[in-house]
Amino acid sequence: MRNEEYYKRIFEPYPDVVTLEQFRTMLGGIGDSTARKLLRGNHVKHFYIRDTYMIPKVWVIEYILSDHYAEYRQKLKVQV
């Protein structure tokens, strides 16, 4: 089963705080506009500092395990 430990293991190579580009890759290569929509809709907790999205890796994992992602990924072409 894919749980928090599973995602901590597969995302281990990523830094503790990821960029928008890294976030997109972590979610299976989603598009830029899709990633920004998730962040702007406050579905994924993040910091926005000087025109830069900073997303702690633990918050990416938290989102992937959320009910919103479970529903949302049905619409996505790619999945983690």
Image: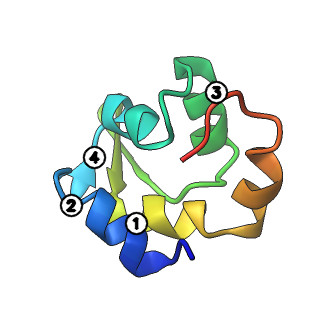
Mark pair 3, 2: CA separation: 24 Å
**In percent of the image, x 83 and y 54: which residue is there?**
71
Q: Earlier in the sequence, mark 2 or mark 1?
A: 1
Mark pair 1, 4: CA separation: 14 Å
What colouring does the structure picture have? rainbow
Left or right: residue 76 compared with residue 33: right
Dot 3 amino acid type: Thr
Say which quadrant the N terminus sits in: bottom right
Instruction: Check disc 3 and report its element: helix, strand or loop.
Output: helix
Instruction: Check disc 2 and report its element: helix, strand or loop.
Output: loop
Q: Earlier in the sequence, mark 4 or mark 3?
A: 4
Dot 1 amino acid type: Tyr
Mark pair 2, 1: CA separation: 8 Å
| Pointer 4 with pointer 2, Cβ within 8 A | no
Mark pair 4, 2: CA separation: 12 Å
Q: Rate crowding at label 3 as few (under 14), some (14 to 19) or many (20 or more) other CA atoms within 10 Å.
A: few
Q: Looking at the picture, how far across and down is residue 43, in whole percent? A: 66, 54
User: What is the number of the mark on residue 7?
Assistant: 1
Residue 6 falls in which quadrant of the image? bottom left
User: What is the number of the mark on residue 18?
Assistant: 4
Is 39 located above or below residue 42 in the figure?
above
Dot 4 amino acid type: Val
Task: List the residue tagged with mark 2.
Answer: 12
Q: Earlier in the sequence, mark 4 or mark 2?
A: 2
State which mark lies toward you, 3 or 2: 2
Is 33 located above or below residue 47 in the figure?
above
Task: List the residue tagged with mark 3.
Answer: 34
Left or right: residue 4 compared with residue 68: left
**In percent of the image, x 78 and y 47: which residue is there?**
72
